[in-house]
Image (cartoon, coloured by chain):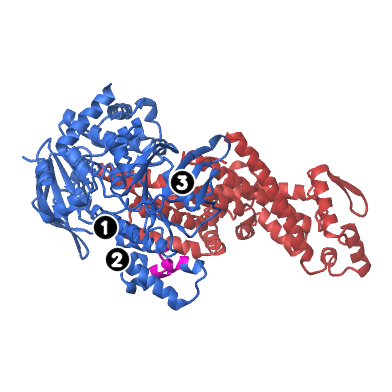
Chain colours: A red, B blue
């Protein structure tokens, strides 16, 4: 099969295979991790009998492959869970119940995902504008003071932890100047305006850090393109520096920017823990860290799969964008 | 006033003086060729005419005046007005010289809009017009193609179209045909000739190929080490050179019409290929690079394989050595079917830069085949490598040197020494001299002939250059689209070609004599109009 349909089919199959592989790895890693999961789940004050009961309820004593089989069953046909007092049906696709709260993992993820996506999407727009803009500017003014200042700033930005920038921003903007309220998450569907105002600082904090990588990447690929023969052609035809940098060199730098963006977007969906924690945003990253610390396997698997899905999705989108940006690229 | 007036030009990059006291003039509508080997400074002069060294750290002395602009004193804005509008440049490699991301018509339109106040639409129309002018079929729709969708010859036409867009007074062509096949080269040179007749623009042609110069210009300037060796009318300089270097250069140029002394070929067949076929790709994209090729190589003879790019000659060479497995057919060595690589059949590669490992000394590279054969005695390996280095005209002390310390010709000698290390009886040379200057090329060709006589080697000489192939070959096979269209003793094939394709190839070879060149051009025109 060829063309776009073939590409979609191959990518979908590839995505499913990747996600399955991820889930197996997470199961195995958790299985071999030392520590008494039932004890942790039950809490420090549980008696040995209670711990035993929990272990049975959660099927912790079953062999690895049985537990993984149950997980797959839940995904495809749904699963019934006994929570001690009642039986809860979890319909397909069922990612299981949290060991800690008995909540369905899917519903946990569905409440947390919009927060993460809000944060990352907005930040992405900002880091692309800031990063690529800075890169272009430093190429445009290359060899001058502007470039050196910008290069220094991006290096500093890269080296600064997000909680330093975030804290400083919060203290100055919300505390001293009182331009914005201290951020708290407001749902987009409730009040789009408040949603944006409250996310402004988190967006900036995350984007400032990420944009440093984009600025450096844009700058270096543009400089590389500027050394190529076709740039010499346009110089030899009297085309001005503005068009050479803004049209020809920037176009050559698009592919690496697209690739970097795909990776950063995908991993930030589940990995912007520091930003989420700092600004009290109940996103996936926070949930994942918490779930790992209490060995809440179903939640970990669920979140990891969702994040994995976004990484793969972002890369597939990047591949399509490559083909749009450069007609020599053939989607396979 | 002359179109170009260069007086006492010097160009220095750091400590290197690339151009040293060069003076010449080019009258309006005239054509001048700068001829020289690599490193002679000819391309540096071409760039200097457009002020392309501004801001690169190069130091320029002397004066340059192009179409009324003093290039040395001009501001950036004045230079931009000169570039493309009054003097336009065509570059060597037409693929890398165009932006891969934009449509060809858009790139031409962009250049046009820089120099005129034309609207987008008018500029686009102008782009189609000039593309049509340089012979791009169906110019309107092809103007929307990206460079990679064009063939090499079409890309060069597109670059020439870009140059024509603003009707410049001077066209500077820097090795415009070096990357092209000989038949395409003839088309491009004919196109330049016709355009010059029609528009009356001046032409400055930069080339290493004396034949290309003879085809295209009225006057020649021979350069060496940044200085003028000789300049004058093309018939005079090439017909009766006064300087020893010019004579040396001309005698090194292989002639397509000169017979050669035959080597001591014997009747015994050493290598035999029958029904060779090699496919690449799968399914619908599969194509046969080599299709049903049979040939024999006799002991001590040279078989020339000649063809244009894409004809399958390299694929054939690799199958003969065993680097590629044929899809069908077989290669027999000494009468036995051969599987995989046989040390008795060795290869010399085209690019002496990339076919040697830059991080290992040349001695180590030459020792590889010895070690592969199971030789472990370091003393003996060293002795043999030293002997081989001396055999190919290098010094034994070069063992410890690295490839970047050698010139192109020396590197190719190293490649030959490496092929000899395994005591081969057949060497397949894949374009062994196409990356070299003519004088170096002549030396390497002479070395191969010497080795052949001494060691009784059989050579398979794969090349696109018809003249070189004639110079070295006893028998010749002409390839086209994966097949051998004509084969026979070299003199017969060259003097009395039977296949129309062979005739077409031979007609496209640039002639050193301007009068012959003019006659051939007229003949090509007749053929084209018929």
Q: What residue sits right under mark 2 in the picture?
A: B393
- The image quadrant that residue B88 belongs to is top left
Q: What residue sits right under mark 1 in the picture?
A: B443
Tag 1, which secondary structure?
helix
Pointers 1 and 2 in contact (C-beta within 8 Å): yes
- The image quadrant that residue A98 belongs to is bottom right
- Check if mark 1 and mark 2 are on a common chain: yes
Vertical order, A130 against B375 (above or below): above
Tag 2, which secondary structure?
loop
User: Could you tell whether A305 is left or right of B380 in the image?
Assistant: right
* Residue A23 drawn at (x, y percent): 73, 54
Q: Is residue B365 in the magenta section? A: yes
* Residue nearer the viewer, A13 or B113: A13
* Residue nearer the viewer, A251 or A327: A327
Tag 3, which secondary structure?
helix
Task: Give the residues in magenta.
Answer: B356-369
């Amino acid at each position: 099969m060829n063309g776009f349909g073939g590409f979609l089919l191959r990518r979908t199959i590839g995505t499913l295979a990747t996600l399955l592989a991820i889930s197996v790895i997470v199961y195995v890693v958790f299985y071999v991790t030392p520590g008494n999961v039932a004890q942790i789940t039950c809490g420090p004050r549980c008696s040995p009998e209670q711990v035993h009961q929990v272990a049975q309820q959660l099927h912790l004593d079953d062999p690895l492959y049985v537990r993984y089989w149950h997980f797959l069953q839940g995904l495809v046909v749904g699963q019934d869970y006994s929570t001690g007092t009642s039986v809860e049906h979890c319909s397909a696709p069922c990612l299981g119940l949290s060991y800690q709260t008995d909540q369905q993992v899917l519903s946990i993820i569905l409440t947390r995902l919009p927060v993460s996506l809000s944060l990352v999407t907005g930040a992405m727009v900002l880091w692309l504008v800031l990063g690529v803009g800075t890169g272009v500017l430093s190429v445009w003014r290359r060899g001058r003071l502007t470039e050196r200042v910008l290069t220094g700033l991006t290096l500093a930005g890269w080296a600064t932890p997000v909680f330093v920038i975030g804290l400083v921003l919060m203290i100055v903007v919300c505390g001293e100047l009182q331009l914005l309220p201290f951020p708290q998450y407001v749902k987009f569907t409730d009040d789009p305006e408040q949603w944006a105002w409250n996310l402004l600082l988190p967006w900036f904090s995350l984007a400032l850090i990420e944009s440093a990588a984009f600025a450096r990447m844009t700058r270096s690929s543009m400089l590389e393109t500027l050394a190529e023969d076709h740039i010499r052609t346009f110089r030899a035809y009297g085309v001005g520096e503005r068009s050479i940098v803004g049209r020809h060199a920037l176009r050559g730098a698009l592919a690496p920017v697209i690739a970097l963006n795909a990776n950063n977007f995908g991993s930030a969906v589940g990995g912007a823990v520091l930003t989420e924690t700092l600004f009290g945003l109940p996103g996936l990253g926070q949930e994942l860290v918490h779930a790992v610390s209490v060995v809440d396997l179903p939640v970990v698997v669920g979140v990891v799969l969702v994040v994995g899905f976004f990484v793969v999705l972002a890369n597939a989108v990047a591949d399509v964008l490559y083909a749009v940006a450069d007609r020599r690229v053939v989607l396979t | 006033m002359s179109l170009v007036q260069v007086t006492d030009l010097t160009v220095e990059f750091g400590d290197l003086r690339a151009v040293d006291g060069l003076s010449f003039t080019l009258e309006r509508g005239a054509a001048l060729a700068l001829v020289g080997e690599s490193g002679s400074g000819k391309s540096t002069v071409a760039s200097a005419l457009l002020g392309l060294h501004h801001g690169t750290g190069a130091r320029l002395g002397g004066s340059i005046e192009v179409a009324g602009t003093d290039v040395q004193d001009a501001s950036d804005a004045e230079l931009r007005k000169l570039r493309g509008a009054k003097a336009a440049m065509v570059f060597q490699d037409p693929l890398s010289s165009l932006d891969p991301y934009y449509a060809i018509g858009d790139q031409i339109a962009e250049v046009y809009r820089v120099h005129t106040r034309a609207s987008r639409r008018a500029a686009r129309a102008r782009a189609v017009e000039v593309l049509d002018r340089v012979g791009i079929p169906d110019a309107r729709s092809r103007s929307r193609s990206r460079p990679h969708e064009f063939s090499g010859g079409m890309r060069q036409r597109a670059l020439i179209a870009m140059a024509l867009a603003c009707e410049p007074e001077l066209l500077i062509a820097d090795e415009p045909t070096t990357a092209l096949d000989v038949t395409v080269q003839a088309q491009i040179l004919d196109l330049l000739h016709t355009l010059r007749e029609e528009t009356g623009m001046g032409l400055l042609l930069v080339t290493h190929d004396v034949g290309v110069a003879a085809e295209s210009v009225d006057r020649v300037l021979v350069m060496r080490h940044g200085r003028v060796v000789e300049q004058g009318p093309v018939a005079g300089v090439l017909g009766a050179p006064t300087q020893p270097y010019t004579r040396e250069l001309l005698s090194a140029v292989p002639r397509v019409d000169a017979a050669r002394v035959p080597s001591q070929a014997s009747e015994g067949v050493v290598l035999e290929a029958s029904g060779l076929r090699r496919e690449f790709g799968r399914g619908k994209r599969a194509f046969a690079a080599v299709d049903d090729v049979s040939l024999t190589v006799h002991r001590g003879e040279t078989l020339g394989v000649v063809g244009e790019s894409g004809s399958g000659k390299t694929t054939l060479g690799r199958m003969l050595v065993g680097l590629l497995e044929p899809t069908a057919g077989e290669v027999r060595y000494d009468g036995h079917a051969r599987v995989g690589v046989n040390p008795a059949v060795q290869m010399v590669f085209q690019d002496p830069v990339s076919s040697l490992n830059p991080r290992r000394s040349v001695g180590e590279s030459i020792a590889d085949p010895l070690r592969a054969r199971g030789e472990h005695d370091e003393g003996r390996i060293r002795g043999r490598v030293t002997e081989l280095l001396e055999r190919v005209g290098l010094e034994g002390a070069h063992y410890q040197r690295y490839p970047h310390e050698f010139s192109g010709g020396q590197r190719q000698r190293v490649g030959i020494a490496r092929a000899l290390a395994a005591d081969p009886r057949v060497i397949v040379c894949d374009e062994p001299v196409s990356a070299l200057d003519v004088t170096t090329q002549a030396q390497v060709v002479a070395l191969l002939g010497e080795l052949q006589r001494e060691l009784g080697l059989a050579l398979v000489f794969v090349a696109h250059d018809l003249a070189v192939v004639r110079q070295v070959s006893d028998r010749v096979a002409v390839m086209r689209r994966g097949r051998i269209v004509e084969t026979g003793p070299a003199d017969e094939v060259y003097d009395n070609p039977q296949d129309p394709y062979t005739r077409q190839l031979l007609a496209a070879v640039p002639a050193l004599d301007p009068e012959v060149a003019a006659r051939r051009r007229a003949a090509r025109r007749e053929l084209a109009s018929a």
